[in-house]
Image (cartoon, rainbow, N blue to C red):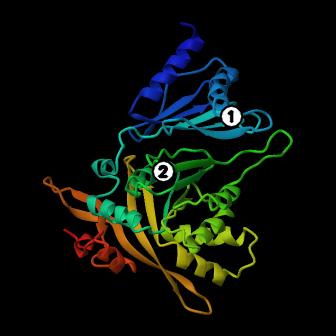
Amino acid sequence: MTAKENSQATLQKLLNDPGVSEIMINGPHKVFVEKNGKKILTDLSFESDEDVLKWVREIYAARSKRVDGEIPYADVCMEDGTRINTIISPISRFGVCVTVRKFSKEIKTADDLVRVGTLNRKGLDFLSACVKARVNMIFSGGTGVGKTTALQMLTHYFAPDERVITIEDSAELQLDQANWISLETKSADRDGRGEVSLRDLIRNALRMAPDRLIVGEVRGSESIDMMQSMSIGLSGTIGIVHGNSPREVVSRMETMILMSGINLAPQEVRKIIGSTIQVVVQMQRMPDGSRKVVCITEVRGIDGEENPQIVFNDLFVHGFIKKDGEGKDVFGLKPVFKKYPLFHDRMRKMNLISDAMFEND
């Protein structure tokens, strides 16, 4: 076996290893993996940048994507949900850099989120009730904290007759929904023409008779289009936003809307957010590498007329639960005792929740 063939075989072995969640190629001669929450330097190396690029370009070409001098960085998503980001020289000073984020194969159902400790049963029951009650939700957190995986598992609670449209930069979501349409943005061609943005896709999706929209990552002016879709009656919309807390996420969304060029005062923007977003699910990566829901917060509306402020209501938070048999502290997601959301009565009448869900065991 040649050195090139050996590199390809080793790379495939890493892709097949269930313990490896991420592969980071920092140029041809330095490859790291994240395994069981720890980043480790491997002994894998490639002969050259071209050796890495050949592998990458075959994957990208099969999905009508490219990486070259005109498009020096791009994402692509494999059929199993694995996402690949590539950036090349001269943007990358270390040559071709590839980051492979594997989709977890150990999480196949929403119950698996409980099994691996992403959240507890009460937290899952509440979020599944929110999905069934068509509550507008935002999943937030840093990169690689499991937002897309958690969101995808909750889509199993969609009604089977719903028409769902997912909108992403790089299509990762894989839904079991029979009436599902996946839309993906498109870069401009070599002449700078043909770009299709998230905004374009959201606006077009509203003409496709959707029952739900899922926006894979909201990071710019498309935020106003997503919230406008919520305000015109498309309830049950779910989006992903990067942020370190529900309050920071809502603040970021306010900034994104104001930067979109829309002619609205900040007070009016807050009113839009307070009347459309209902729940923020905050996720975080813990020191041991595990990924957890650390907060489920209701966006309760606004308070004040002259200078309205968005009101938050923490429903579930990550904190001390009990001591185990060895006297060690056990932490997890727990309800904030008897703090109910505004839509509590509606969900109770639908037999989706009970008061016991908001009580600590």
Q: Residue at x 67, y 48 (%)?
A: 185
| Few, some or many residues within 10 Å of mark 2 (<14, 14–19, 20+) | some
Q: Residue at x 51, y 55 (%)?
A: 164
The residue nearer to you, when weighing 241 against 125, is 125
Considering depth in this image, is 276 or 210 the residue closer to the camera? Answer: 210
Residue at x-position 74% and y-position 37%: 72
Residue 301 position in % (x across, y down): 50, 82
Packing grade of label 1 (10 A; few <14, some 14-19, many >=20) is: few
Three-letter amino acid code at the position of disc 2: Thr
User: Between residues 176 and 22, which one lies in front from this camera angle?
Assistant: 176
When the figure is inspected, residue 103 is found, relative to residue 319, above or below; the finding is above
Q: Examine the image and state in which quarter residue 126 appears.
A: bottom left
Q: Nearer the viewer, mark 2 or mark 1?
A: 1
Residue located at (76% from left, 48% from top): 195
Q: Secondary structure at mark 2?
A: helix
Which quadrant is home to the C terminus? bottom left
Rendered view: 226 above or below 174: below
Report helix, strand or loop for mark 1.
loop
Identify the residue under disc 1. 64
Q: Is residue 121 above or below residue 153?
A: below
Question: Can residue 239 be seen here?
Answer: no
> Where is residue 299 shown, x and y percent of the image?
47, 75
Which mark sits nearer the N-terminus, 2 or 1? 1
Q: How many marks?
A: 2
Q: Any mark on residue 74, and which? A: none
Which numbered disc covers residue 148? 2
How far apart are the two marked residues, 2 and 1, measured between alpha carbons?
A: 23 Å
Type of amino acid at the residue the image marks with label 1: Ser
